[in-house]
Image: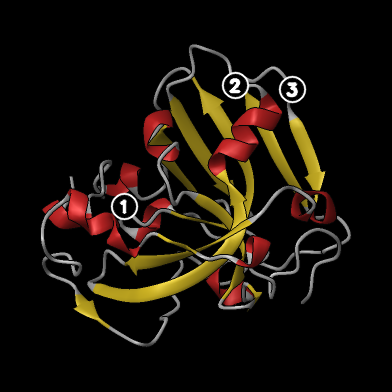
Amino acid sequence: MSGSGGTDAATEADGDVQDLTGLYREYGDDRLPPGQRETDRFPVLSKSGTPSWDPETFAFEVWGAVDDPLDLSLSEFRDLPAVTQRQDFHCVTGWSKFDCAFTGVEFAEIVDHAGVCDDVEHVLFHALDGYTTNLSLDECARDGVLFAYGYDGDDLPADHGGPIRVVTPHKYAYKGAKWVSGVEFLTEKELGYWEKRGYSDTADPWNEERYS
C-alpha cells in the first residue's frame, strides 16, 4: 500500500542517509550486543497478528500534556519533514539485523508540533492492535527514534508495522511499537504491554536488559 502526500518512502531525505550504525560505541566495542545473533532476514513478531486498517480513516494522534494535540491523517503525517536513517535493529528474542534503512519523521518533529509541556517526563506509544510501550522523554529525544513509514526504499510492510512504526536502535525492538496510532505525553510513568508482563523497562541490548 502506497501512502499519498509527503515524502515518498523510496526517496531518501535530501538525497542523504544518516548513518546511525555507530551508536553501539556508546556502550562498548561490539556492534552486536551480547546474546544476539546477526541475521539477514527480518523476522515478523507481534502479540496478536497484523491488524487491519483503512488508509482513508487512519489517524495519528498526539495528546496528553501538550499545548496543541494533533490528529493527522496518513497523508498529513507524511507531509511532515522526513529523514532516512541507517540503523541496526535488535530483537529481544535474540536476533539483530544490521543496516536497516528507515524513512520517517523524527520524534523531535512531533514534539515541536505538539508543544510538549515542561513537566512531561514520559511517553506512552499506542498501537492499532492495543499494544503500548513506554519510554522516558529523554530516551525519545535520542538520535534514531523515528516514526518510520518507509523501509529500504519502499513503504514499510504491514507485517513490520506499516503504515507507521517507531524504531529505537538503542533499545530492544519491543520499545518500538508497530502500527502506531498515537503518542501520549505523560507527567508520570505508565508501563506498556510487555513491561507490565515482566519485560525490562530499560531494555538496553548491550546490558542484556531483557526482563525485569
Q: Examine the rendered structure and indicate whether residue 47 appears above or below residue 200.
A: below
State the residue position of label 1.
170
Residue 8 vertical position relative to residue 130 in the rendered view, above or below = below
Which of the 4 image quadrants contains residue 191?
A: top left
> Where the N terminus falls, by quadrant?
bottom right
Along the viewing direction, whichever of 177 and 98 lies nearer the viewer: 98
Camera sees residue 148: yes
Does 120 sit left or right of 87 as displayed?
Answer: right
Asked whether the beta carbons under mark 1 and mark 3 sit within 8 Å of each other, the answer is no
Using the rendered image of the protein, determine whether residue 179 is visible from the camera's viewpoint. no
Looking at the rendered structure, the kind of residue marked 3 is Asp
Instruction: Give x and y (percent) for residue 212.
Output: 18, 44
Image side of residue 31 versus residue 157, left or right: left
Mark 2 = which residue?
Answer: 116
Question: The disc labelled 1 sits on which kind of residue?
Answer: His
Q: Which residue is mark 3?
A: 68
Which amino acid type corresponds to the residue marked 2 in the rendered image? Val
Q: Position of residue 70 (x, y in %)?
A: 75, 33
Secondary element at tag 1: loop
Give the residue drawn at x 42%, y 22%: 121
